[in-house]
Image (cartoon, rainbow, N blue to C red):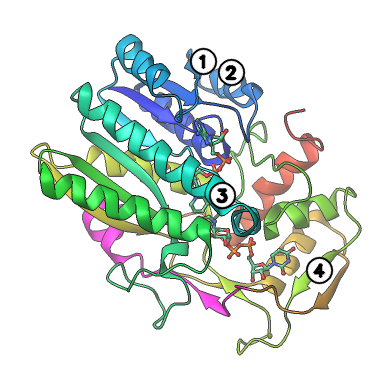
Amino acid sequence: MRILVTGGAGYIGTHTCLVLQQAGHDVAVLDNLANSKREGLTRVEALSGRPLGFYHVDLLDPPEVDRVFREFAPEAVLHFAALKAVGESVQFPAKYYQNNVTGTLNLCAAMDRHAVRTLVFSSSATVYGAPEEIPIREEAPLRATNPYGWSKVMMELILTDLHRADPTWRLSVLRYFNPVGAHQSGTIGEDPTGIPNNLFPYVTQVAVGKLDNLQIFGGDYPTADGTGIRDYIHVVDLAEGHLRALERLDPNGGHQIYNLGTGRGYSVLDVVRAFERIVGRAIPYEIVDRRSGDVAECYADPGRARTALQWEAGRDLDQMCEDAWRWQSQNPSGYA
Ligand code: NAD
Ligand code: WQD
């Protein structure tokens, strides 16, 4: 199949492009490189041994998006392109709504014009806000706690209505929990700009000596060790979930929503201890105040994806840490 991957130069996109190519698909990436580098795609090509189409295009530029559809003529789209920094979205909400929501509207309009109505969409567990029940099921109410999260809720609502209006759309909405780790080769991985916001890249940068110590946000949560619990999922498991979601789309149209998580929660201290075992030395940390907007505990009920997609995240916490560490230690400055 000819698959267009928006945001394919980013962290999850590069891993998914590789899985798609390895499954024999013809892949092209549309990315404005706002938060990624071309080098990631060069490395995907080296791993797959196959060329990857690349369009340096912004989804906010509809004529250019149209050109991509004319030239590449995709049969399906995987839509990763978005801005994703929670704190930045609070500071610059209009930028986030404009990029994420308008970008998605432009993409859907181009898809409709070119009669490509097969879409796998990157959503997030952030759409559950502070969940009332854990593990979280797909039926849980949608409510975000920041503009980034609301942009995901809005994009999901837009897709729901598109399918209502034209049931020939084939839509799979994937709500990721906490994607971490890297490809086992250590040649592609997460390359955050500046000081990382997320736990895994922060810990690996402490371990490699780029940052002095980890600040653990809150030691007084109602959890076993007092630190926050999350459902970390290996990025390659996540990438494989996209392939499966694409393969399982109903040829006659449909709209499915799946949690992609492991169903297992680990605390911040569990993650620190796992890294210490793998790196072979202590990770210096201090426990500080809670980070505003954080919840105590968040993990998926992954049952629907297991049943309907016959997909399960198989890689465990040690493998997530090992692969994250291999990537960080082999590429201390990321793709630079
Ligand atoms: P990323 O920033 O590494 O990748 C996103 C890519 O989209 C980047 O390469 C960026 O340059 C591109 N992009 C952004 N705006 C664009 C635009 N207007 N036009 C063209 N390209 C554009 O992020 P990621 O971690 O790979 O996330 C991929 C998707 O998954 C995003 O939609 C994100 O919201 C979602 N998601 C990520 C996480 C996570 O923790 N990483 C969790 C849940 C959901
Ligand atoms: C994990 C745990 C922190 C950093 C975010 C987004 C979410 C989704 C995934 C896109 C928490 C603690 C972290 C640090 C720490 N993204 N922590 N010190 O917040 O669960 O989810 O990424 O959709 O929308 O909000 O992930 O990795 O930032 O935090 O103690 O320096 O680690 O408090 O308990 P989070 P995270």
Q: Is residue 330 above or below residue 174?
A: above
Vertical arrangement, residue 232 with respect to residue 159, above or below: below
Q: Is mark 4 within 8 Å of ligand 2?
A: yes
Label 4 – label 3 distance at C-alpha: 21 Å
Q: As rendered, which of 207 and 11 lies closer to the eye? A: 11
At which x and y percent is residue 159? 26, 48
Q: Secondary structure at mark 3?
A: loop
In the image, the segment drawn in magenta is 293-313
Q: Quadrant of the N terminus?
A: top left
Label 1 lies in ligand 1 vicinity (Cβ under 8 Å):
no
Q: Answer with the quarter of the image where residue 212 lies.
A: bottom right
- Give how far apart the Cα atoms at labels 3 and 2 are: 27 Å
* Numbered label attached to residue 215: 4
Q: Which residue is mark 3?
A: 84
| Residue 310 visible here | no
Mark 2 lies on a secondary structure that is helix
Residue that numbered label 1 is attached to: 49
Label 2, residues with CA under 10 Å away: few <14, some 14-19, many ≥20? few
Amino acid of disc 2: Ala
Q: Nearer the viewer, mark 1 or mark 3?
A: 3
